[in-house]
Image (cartoon, rainbow, N blue to C red):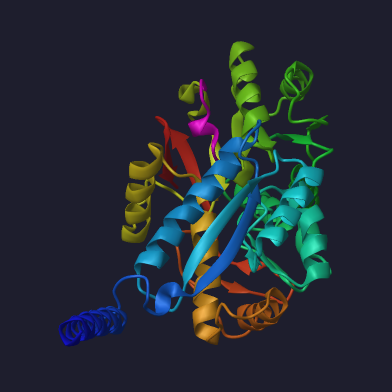
Amino acid sequence: MKRKNFAKTLVALTMAAMMTLTMAACGDKKADGGGEENNTTAVLKMGTIGPLTGPAAVYGNAVKNGATVAVEEINASGGPFKIELNAQDDEHDAEKAVNAYNNLKDWGMQVLMGTTTTSPCIAVASETYADRIFQLTPSASSSDVTAGKDNVFQMCFTDPNLGKTAADYMLENKLGKKVAAIYNNADAYSAGVFNAFKAEMKAKGVELVYEGTFSSDDNADFSVQLNGAKAAGADLVFLPIYYTPASLILAQADSMGYDPTFFGVDGLDGILAMEGFDKSLADGVMLMTPFNPWSDNEKVKNFVSKYEEAYKETPNQFAADAYDAVYAIYNAMVKAGAGTDKTPAELCETLVGTFTKEFTYSGLTGSDMTWGTNGEVSKAPVVCLIQDGQYKDL
């Protein structure tokens, strides 16, 4: 019996020693910052919404992919917390965007980086305002997105800013003698940019020779609009529209022998990534955008390299804005000392206060960016020329 008791005691002591060694090893792992048990186990649940399928999918997938590059960098940095990103598809539809938002709420979302396109974002912004969830959209540019909502911010230019800046650039650089415009009068983004553009041109004493409208981005025939601009003698055509209708306009203008200078804004970014699009049709198109993926800037080159390796394509402005939006939220939280244990409403108030007071961010799409209490970002635009399938700085 004594030998059996001795054996039991020896086994117990051995197991206790092994447990002590295991706990010590875990403690060492935590102390040296490795593994899962360090302070990076804190996780921020970040949602994003955009068109991952459908005709505007280039935008939504670019946002998702650009955000993913940022999240992977942050999670590997050993910072105070990690980010879990949940991307939902809204097919560029406002009702589906609200459904996606509710899915993210059920998941436990703490902040929203999105949505991607304007009309869905306007619908979702009303929800985040009511729920007090902080929202930073990378690319929804209408002033209606942020109007009356202190918790909604933009990484992109606002529509009035785009329209006014485009008009000033055209006039200052004397790009054309007769100016026309073709826009979607049923889309908040397109109409918002156009209205600001027209107002600025008129304020500078320039009347548009032709205004062509359409009411759906599914529109396939632009012969009426193009013939109208051509008949009016327009040698410069402003396109404050998304890349899908723009690609058709360029193709149809080429087939009818109409060759004005086409000038687009950020919605046209992504046209070079369209499957089946003849990139030569975009040669000579001017584009106002905050991001040039062919820039010599080291930060841009590093991002482009990682993005191309992961997704086998060149990132557009939407990807860059999303990358910057993720980092801006992360940096603002770090600056404020905000932990991930806060409720979405508590985190919202912290981020609103931080974004509007002595917070700057420098990234891929601008340096020393700041935000006003109206949610609008302050940064300088860049105008590029599309040539040989690339953007060239002007």
Image location of residue 6, percent across then percent down: 18, 86
Report the side of 38 relative to 348 (left or right): left
Report the side of 280 relative to 177 (left or right): left
Residue nearer the viewer, 344 or 305: 344
Residue nearer the viewer, 29 or 255: 29
As for residue 289 lying within the magenta part, the answer is no
Image location of residue 378, percent across then percent down: 60, 68
Image location of residue 186, percent across then percent down: 84, 38
Whether residue 176 is visible here, answered yes or no, is: no
Which of the 4 image quadrants contains residue 12? Answer: bottom left
Report the side of 23 relative to 247 (left or right): left
Q: Is residue 209 above or below residue 98?
A: above
As for residue 275 lying within the magenta part, the answer is yes
What's the residue at 41%, 42% (across, down)? 392
Image location of residue 48, percent across then percent down: 62, 55
How many numbered discs? 0
Q: Main secondary structure of the magenta part?
A: loop
* Residue range corresponding to the magenta coloring: 269-277
